Image (spheres, helix red, strand yellow):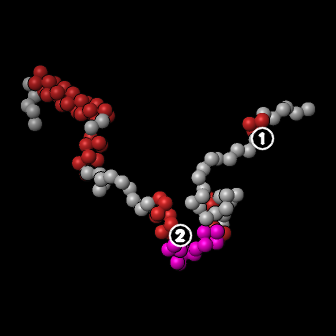
Amino acid sequence: MGFPVPTFLTRTTTLDVETSHLPLDCDSHAHTLTIEALLKSLKTDTKEGLPTAYIEKRRGKWGENKIEGANGVSIWKVLMGQLVNALTFVLLGALVSKHLSWIHTHSIHNVPLH
């Protein structure tokens, strides 16, 4: 005697993904194909690449393959992002506390600070 299997486990679902821009047929997924099958379905090879007409068609539809925005991240922005965080402030507080404690201890016992 078995347990009934919930319908959500037996139902196959398809993702609603726009695939019209791909030269692959809808039933195949690129990640499941061999390299040779993928190259054949794309009508390309590893030496020549994609056909120029196909490239131009994609550029017309999707635009250039460029990241919009600034010309990169400033090194100062990266440095400040690394320095200005909670852990850095905790460590700096511990450093100051340790040095003040050391100075206080040496001043009480009249030990020269060197």
Query: Quarter of the image holding residue 23?
Result: bottom right
Q: Residue furthest top?
A: 108
Query: Quarter of the image holding residue 5?
Result: top right
Left or right: 61 as drawn, with respect to 45: left
Q: Main secondary structure of the magenta part?
A: loop
Left or right: 37 as drawn, with respect to 106: right
On the image, the x and y values in percent for residue 102 come to 17, 28
| Residue 35 seen in the figure | no
Q: Which residue is mark 1?
A: 10
For marks 2 and 1, give the CA distance: 39 Å
Residue drawn at (66%, 66%) of the image: 34
**Residue closest to the eye, 47 or 80:** 47
Tags 2 and 1 in contact by the CB under 8 Å rule? no
Q: Earlier in the sequence, mark 2 or mark 1?
A: 1
Q: Is residue 35 magenta?
A: no
Q: Which residue is mark 2?
A: 54
**Residue closest to the eye, 62 or 89:** 62
Q: Quadrant of the N terminus?
A: top right
Kindly identify the amino acid type of the residue bearing the numbered disc 1. Answer: Thr
Q: Name the disc covering residue 111, or none.
A: none
Secondary structure of the residue carrying tag 2 is helix
Q: Quadrant of the C terminus?
A: top left
Residue drawn at (26%, 32%) of the image: 89
Does residue 95 sit above or below 33 in this rendering?
Answer: above
**Residue closest to the eye, 83 or 109:** 83
Magenta span covers which residues? 40-54
On the image, the x and y values in percent for residue 67 come to 38, 56
On the image, the x and y values in percent for residue 14 come to 68, 47
